[in-house]
Image: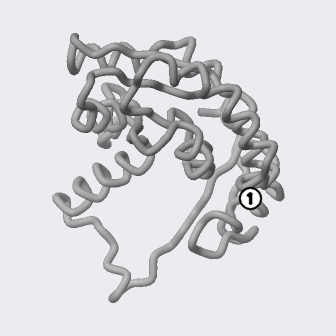
Amino acid sequence: QKEIEIPIIGVIEAGAKTACEVTETKHIGVIGTEGTVKSRIYTQCLTKLDPEITVVSKACPLFVPLVEEGLVEDRITDDIASRYLGELKDYDIDTLILGCTHYPLIRNTIARTMGEQVKLVNPAYETTKSLKKLLLEKGMLCNERTKEPVYEYYVSDAVERFIAFADGVLPCNVSEENVKSIDIEAF
């Protein structure tokens, strides 16, 4: 934020804020990759927003490859979800943060496993709401009725795999014309 003069909207903060708003018991679960869980970033952000909140985190590393392989509504995904999420049920959480951008794609599986009493928070969705608000405030939001939006995707690995995956989950056409390979180390 100090290095560049453009607004930065944090996905962690947006998800944590919403989780704090919707929890009734102040018992919040976080699922994410090994790196996200080990960083304790969600725990730090949640307890900064409300020191009375109890956070239970669980790494669910197999969720990412299951989603990327297209096993979204598959028995194997149900089995893995039961194994990972069963532990969280013992903590009586009422809110669960989906702490990886892949996890909302298996939201139905996670919801079935956790039960309807647990509210699911998608930080990516909450971030898009913050972004839309910022773009509206700055008069920069594209009006799709008057101007066709332009989509550009920058990926650091496996362009063809990204195109196949994204074309199946995004509401717009994803092709080689709007996907660019970048070297992440250059940034």
Question: Where is residue 77 shown, x and y percent of the image?
Answer: 75, 43
Question: Where is residue 16 shown, x and y percent of the image?
Answer: 33, 30
Colouring: one colour
Q: Check the picture and name the quadrant holding the N terminus.
A: top left
- Looking at this view, is 139 or 123 the one in front? 123
Q: Residue at x 22, y 12 (%)?
A: 52
Instruction: Give the answer, above or below, for where 144 lies relative to 184.
Output: below
Instruction: Give the answer, above or below, for where 70 lies relative to 24.
Output: below
Q: Quadrant of residue 149 in the image?
A: bottom left
Q: Residues within 10 Å of mark 1 (few under 14, many from 20)?
A: some
Position of 28 with respect to 78 (left or right) is left
Position of 5 with respect to 43 (left or right) is left
Question: Where is residue 186 shown, x and y percent of the image?
Answer: 65, 33
**Tag count:** 1
Q: Which residue is mark 1?
A: 165
Local SS, label 1: helix
- Looking at this view, is 63 or 39 the one in front? 63
Q: Residue at x 73, y 51 (%)?
A: 181
- Amino acid beneath label 1: Phe
Question: Where is residue 30 shown, x and y percent of the image?
Answer: 48, 26
- Looking at this view, is 51 or 76 the one in front? 76
Q: Residue at x 47, y 13 (%)?
A: 40
Q: Quadrant of residue 135 in the image?
A: bottom left
Q: Residue at x 35, y 47 (%)?
A: 126
- Looking at this view, is 169 or 58 the one in front? 58
Residue extending furthest toward the left: 137
Instruction: Give the answer, above or below, for where 186 lies relative to 182.
Output: above
Q: Check the picture and name the quadrant holding the C terminus.
A: top right
